[in-house]
Image: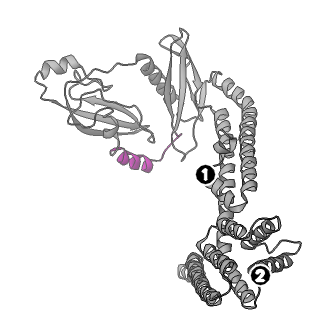
Amino acid sequence: MRLSGITVSKKTEMYMRQLYEKNEADKKIRILGRKRICLFISFVLVSAIISIPVFVADEKERTQPITQLHRNEYGKGTGIRTLRAVSDDGYEHNITVDVEERRYTDDEIRQMSEQLDNVIWETILADNTDPENVMYDLDFKDHIDGYPFSITYKSDRPLILGSRGTIDAKRLKKEDPDDEGVEVCICATAKYKDYSEDKYSYVVLHERKKGVADDFMNSINDSVEEFGKLTETEDILELPQSVNGHRIRFYDTSVNRGWMLLVTGVVAALLVMAAKDRKIKDEALGRKKQMEYDHPNILNQYTLYYTAGMNPRSIWYAMCKRYEESIGISHKNKRYAYDEMLSARNKMEEGCSELAAYDGFAARCDDIRYRSFISFVKQAVVKGNEGLSEILYSEMDKAMREKNNRVKKQASEAETKLLLPMFMMLIVVLVIVMLPAFIGLKN
């Protein structure tokens, strides 16, 4: 399989075949495929080389025990960090630590407490979807993301529903053998410094699967929470060094800069290739529009030469010569349709038959207008001049009408594109006029 078949899309290949002759197009497609492979490999290699020291630094940082976490400044919200806790006896677990802000005002606390009502009862449901049909342990979170409160829970049936949200299945089965449901009132107490508020809700417990409590994680979370309360007015949240007599080390699991750099390099390579595809597509579409624009002019020139009595080959050569004289050396006035005419002329000079050269021109243009034009040219070659002048004049009038309609359409599209700048200018004018008036009224 060719490299171009992997890296060059079918659409891009189609556009390139529109822009270039077959042999040249094949060559350019192969070159583009090789360039893209080299570009992609280069980006990946460079990204990998740059990533190596970053990977080393990340790994070193992840394996370096930490003893403190920096708090966010006021107004930046609660920071959430994921840590890996490892004990001396080899037990480890990932935990999530909420690094709260240093302090909130009383008004903000009351406002956040009102907002908490909308989320707390949905949050504690955990795997349960309906408070009327609670089958699994509830998730009594000590903290809810985005809120600074420490939350404690209690129920009016503590023997069945504990303060951690665990359900005693044996007692529930004993008190409700028919599984009709046991209604339990939950009181959630949200505390922040001196502020405290009780919130109430009801759930109905049914027979369920018992959850597995993770004592190690709960103990660490409790210890981290306790240390957080001791340092809540400081910039640093101290982490515990031991839990339940076991030494604990924490590692930051969020350090992944090396992978981010490597992925960025791959994405950058893909974006560069996509930009090249877009450039080729724009060039092909520009070629098509330019050829549509030049069709009436080519038809007009051919008709004038034809009515002057010249034969089709002479007309073709004369039009090519005139085009070559117009572009000169600078090639600033390059036109795709005339370039295709030059290519057809060169094929005639190399020995290709006149009709075959015309057919090749029509195929390269790939437009119904040029196919119709070439059919008239071939008719003049095969059958002579009889009745062709009237047909050419008719086609010329039709082409000019199409050109005028195309210009009108472009003009209407330009008016539509100008609407947004006009509205923006209107807003600026209104601001300039009305702002002094408002300032005057304020004074």
Q: Residue at x 40, y 47 (%)?
A: 112
Amino acid type for the residue under numbered disc 2: Ile
Dot 2 surroundings within 10 Å: few (below 14), some, or many (20 or more)? some
Percent x, y for residue 201?
24, 38
Q: Which mark is residue 10?
A: 1
Q: In this rendering, which labeled residue sits more in front, label 2 or label 1?
A: 2
Percent x, y for residue 278?
65, 57
Q: CA distance from mark 2 to mark 1?
A: 38 Å
Q: Which mark is residue 155?
A: none
Task: Name the element at disc 2.
Answer: helix
Amino acid type for the residue under numbered disc 1: Lys
Quadrant assignment, res 83 = top right
Q: Which residues are magenta?
A: 101-117
Q: Is residue 426 visible?
A: no
Is residue 225 a member of the stretch shown in magenta? no
Q: Residue at x 76, y 55 (%)?
A: 24
Dot 1 surroundings within 10 Å: few (below 14), some, or many (20 or more)? few
Look at mark 2 in the image and give the residue it sits on.
315
Q: Is residue 107 left or right of residue 71?
A: left
Q: Which secondary structure is most common in the magenta stretch?
A: helix
Q: Residue at x 58, y 28 (%)?
A: 253
Q: What is the quadrant of the C terminus in the image?
A: bottom right
